[in-house]
Image (cartoon, rainbow, N blue to C red):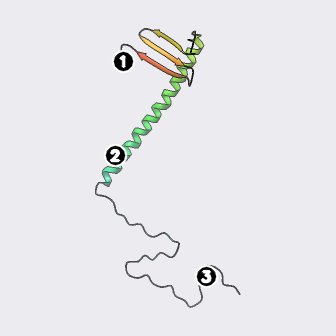
Amino acid sequence: MAKKKGTKKKGTKEAEPKKGESKARKGEQLDLIEVHPKNVKAIVREARLYKELQATRLSALAKEVAQKEKVKEMVKAAGFQRLDDGTIRFEYDGVLVTVAPQDDKITVKDKEKDE
């Protein structure tokens, strides 16, 4: 009869680990040692702040993209005459708006605030 894989013979003992060795068997995860730098609390605090700021930025980016689409739709619906290169450009009340056709890039320059 063939021996089943993973079974041990009757009457055999597993060897006890030597001093300083782990009790983990072959293929098992060893216990992890909890060793941290002295400033680990400060690192985690800064990492959490980073994550918070990242979430704020991503939220603002989503709002920016939605607003860009709204401006683009309104400019196209207004029926402005395109320039030779396909760009739509107009100025009103000190604000220069440019919509480039390549990737629908929108540029807005406020002459009063950008100075």
1 vs 2, front mark:
1
Give the quarter of the figure containing the N terminus: bottom right
Which corner quadrant of the image does residue 73 belong to?
top right
User: How far from the left and from the top, in percent, is residue 2?
Assistant: 69, 85
Q: Which residue is mark 2?
A: 46
Question: Given the current orientation, which residue lies at the most extreme left position?
Answer: 38
Q: What is the spatial separation of the Cα atoms under label 2 and label 3, in whole angstroms? A: 50 Å
Q: Residue at x 59, y 84 (%)?
A: 8
Q: Which residue is mark 3?
A: 7
Which corner quadrant of the image does residue 11 belong to?
bottom right
Which corner quadrant of the image does residue 102 belong to?
top right
Q: In the rendered structure, which amino acid carries the disc numbered 1?
A: Asp
Query: Quick one: SS at disc 3?
Result: loop
Query: Quick one: SS at disc 2?
Result: helix
Crowd around label 1: few <14 · some 14–19 · many ≥20 (10 Å):
few
Crowd around label 2: few <14 · some 14–19 · many ≥20 (10 Å):
few
Disc on the earlier residue, 1 or 2: 2
Query: Quick one: SS at disc 1?
Result: loop
Work out whether 103 lies above or below 25.
above
Q: Which residue is mark 1?
A: 114
Q: Residue at x 33, y 50 (%)?
A: 43
Q: In the rendered structure, which amino acid carries the disc numbered 2?
A: Glu
Crowd around label 3: few <14 · some 14–19 · many ≥20 (10 Å):
few
